[in-house]
Image: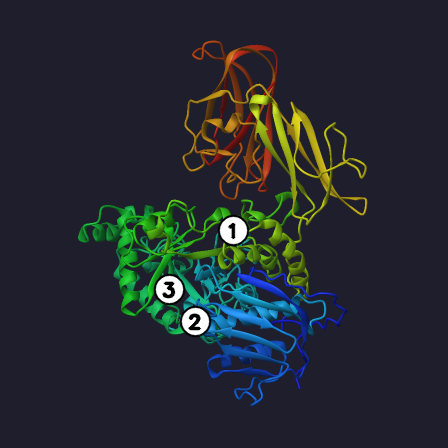
Amino acid sequence: MKKHIILLLLVAGLWIPARSQSQGNLDLIPRPTLLKAQPGSFSLTPQTPVYTIPAFSAVARLYSETAHLPYPKLAFPQKGPAKAVVFAMADKSAVPDSAGYQLKISTSHVTILARTQTGALAGMQSLLQLQLLQPDQTLLPCADITDHPRFGYRGVHLDVSRNFFPAAYIKRFIDLMALYKMNTFHWHLTDGAGWRLEIKRYPELTQVAAWRNYATWKDWWTHGRRYSRESDPNAYGGYYTQAEAREIVVYAAQRGITIIPEIEMPGHSEEVLAIYPQLSCSGIPYKNSELCLGNDATFTFLEQVLTEVMDIFPSSYIHIGGDEADKKAWQHCPKCQQRIRDEKLKDENELQSYAIKRMEKFLSAHHRKLLGWDEILEGGLAPAATVMSWRGESGGIAAAKAGHDVIMTPGGYCYFDSYQADPATQPEAIGGYLPLDKVYSYEPVPKELDAQNVKHVLGAQANIWTEYIPTSYHLEYMVYPRLLALSEVLWSDTTHKNFADFQQRMQSQYHLLQRLNVNYYRPSYAVTIHPEIDAAHHRTVISFGSEQYQPEIRYTLDSTLPNNQSARYTGPFAVTGSAPVRAAIFKDNQLQGAPAFLQLDDHLAIGKKVIYNIPYSQKYPAQQAATFVNGYRGSLTYGDGQWQGFEGDVDITVDMDQATALHRLSITFMQLTGPGVYMPSYVELLTSDDGKNFKPVKQVNNDIPTSNVTLTFKDFKFDLSGETARYIRIRAKNEQHGFMFADEVIIY
């Protein structure tokens, strides 16, 4: 007889001894639609029988195997099953949603009622999660649960090109997805860093293009980006055989997860063109990243590859990428230009659209649907294409209004390769800042869509790009617990959406993740300081936040460091004028982590008029003309709405309304070289009495080198003692020709 379940998914392999339990734990994530606790508990034993109707036999078998219970029985005893787990059919009145379920736990039975196998699987995952949540996993708390998903598409994307993860780990990744009711695995199988799927017609794709000469993506990227061979002792990489991929497809389907393969085109194809340069515009290996769209051989290659892909993956969607294609090679390619003339296309945007539409026609002929990133909108969208909106939500909004289905995956909420805490405390990441509470705050349905267009929003998806994620250990650190927040956004209704309640349930989920040996990101002891500025009354209301649950926060306003005798935070409070705010968490009278600091600056420039002599970037407008003088300092990410972006120089003038005696000024810039954000080479200050004739006052040069790749901030400070002026002009030189991000101008 198999031993009774102690851990789920066969991935942890630990025996958790039974402990006394005063009450059951019902801290499920995602939160069910309805959950009502009942008195008592159901006692599981290694001999607890499992009964099922034939329609749910596969689900019951998976449950029995995972829970180490006896093989399920199809024949119910005449007197009814006693002390059993039962999978049964529900009628429509009990479970209106075909993807929903009821889970009823009484002292005598555990019953999962559903109308479809999809609903039965969801109920099974809730039951398994409940078992893992209990201190004594042989005692299940009695409860009545009725549940169904808000969205039909609940996705997780994993890039295995930049760094390869073996098939055995992909199964664990899928197990964890299923536990939290995510139902789509977007498998990013090809990109410039490596081709990861065996294609029998083109064996060089895995013999050569799946291997590189450096272990990390970063080293490969900065040292020539060359490929190796499978037999080379120094080769790094890997690929999935077709047999492995088929096995994973079946494994995922058993757990209610559809796998969507992505075969990148027409850009991000360096690895293909290195071994098949005849498919590039130049015909030279290692020169182009984009496939030549004027060459019919390109489409022959793509169709033959996709034919093998479709034979492995039964998903209705095939993802073709379509993002970030550099169109310069097409502009100078005779074949591409001939294609533009022959097809009467307007430009290279329409050339890409031609290629996407051609591939959609091919997929449609094989009864599949095309899915692509929002760049496939450029030049005109293929008739039946579905769009993944990653560059914000505008692409998704435009596609939905045009009648196309959309999956929302904006970088600001769904990119789990972003930092989740202060970069100074974290492993290197690609940039950005996406903490748990921001993921939870996401609303996938844009307010710009009317009732008719809302139906095109199928759901949303987490994206994990692995440039800086070399191991599965690191991967789990980036995904968990953020995936739990997104799972609740996508599954649960919005009626009871509440981060405080979610955070309370997370305290139990941390223990569950520990039991499964998941290397999740531990909640930080950092304190965040939130100011609400009332400029008219020179007053600021301060509140504190933390990733810790109900922490003891103590603070000071007098420049001293907090200690265990300092004022204890009990709720928002007001501060008049300027003050240094310091706050820290204490546990058992001991300081936890470094104190947070915010200088409240009730400075002279707040609310003044700012004149832009050079416009800011429309991509990053922040608070527009109020950005520099609203009293708010930017956070750790340029996407927070407080950092204003510039694609050229900064040249602004602050109008102080009248001649003003000046003492000091500062303006802050950010550097994060990965996405191309740099410090100015210098900041220059000029003053004027009439706003026309300016005299130079001082210049401060940058001392942060571009070789510094970590997130860095610099206050450019000016001593203005003795200066009087009405107009203050600030000019910053964009010598690197990337982005510059600047924030608050502070004047005293």
User: Circles 1 and 3: CB distance less than 8 Å?
Assistant: no
What percent of the width, then of the height, locates residue 740?
49, 33
Provide the residue designation for mark 2: 92
Distance CA(mark 1)–CA(mark 2): 61 Å
Which image quadrant for residue 51? bottom right
Q: Tell me the kind of residue under disc 2.
A: Lys
Question: Distance between the Cα atoms at labels 3 and 2?
Answer: 33 Å
Per the image, the residue denoted by label 1 is: 223
What x and y, as percent, mark residue 538?
60, 22
Name the disc covering residue 318, or none: 3
Contact? badges 3 and 2 (CB < 8 Å): no
Q: Residue at x 65, y 68 (%)?
A: 132
Amino acid type at image mark 1: His
Mark found first going from the N terminus, 3 or 2: 2
Residue 395 relative to residue 620: left or right:
left
Identify residue type, mark 3. Ile
Q: Is residue 229 above or below residue 428?
A: below
Let me know if residue 703 appears in the view: no
Indicate the colouring scheme: rainbow
Marked residue nearer the N-terminal end (1 or 3): 1
Location of residue 276 with respect to 655 vertically, above or below: below
Q: What's the CA distance linking mark 1 and mark 3?
A: 33 Å
Q: Residues within 10 Å of mark 3 (few under 14, many from 20)?
A: many
What is the secondary structure assignment of the residue under circle 2? loop
Q: Which is in the foreground here, disc 3 or disc 2?
A: 2
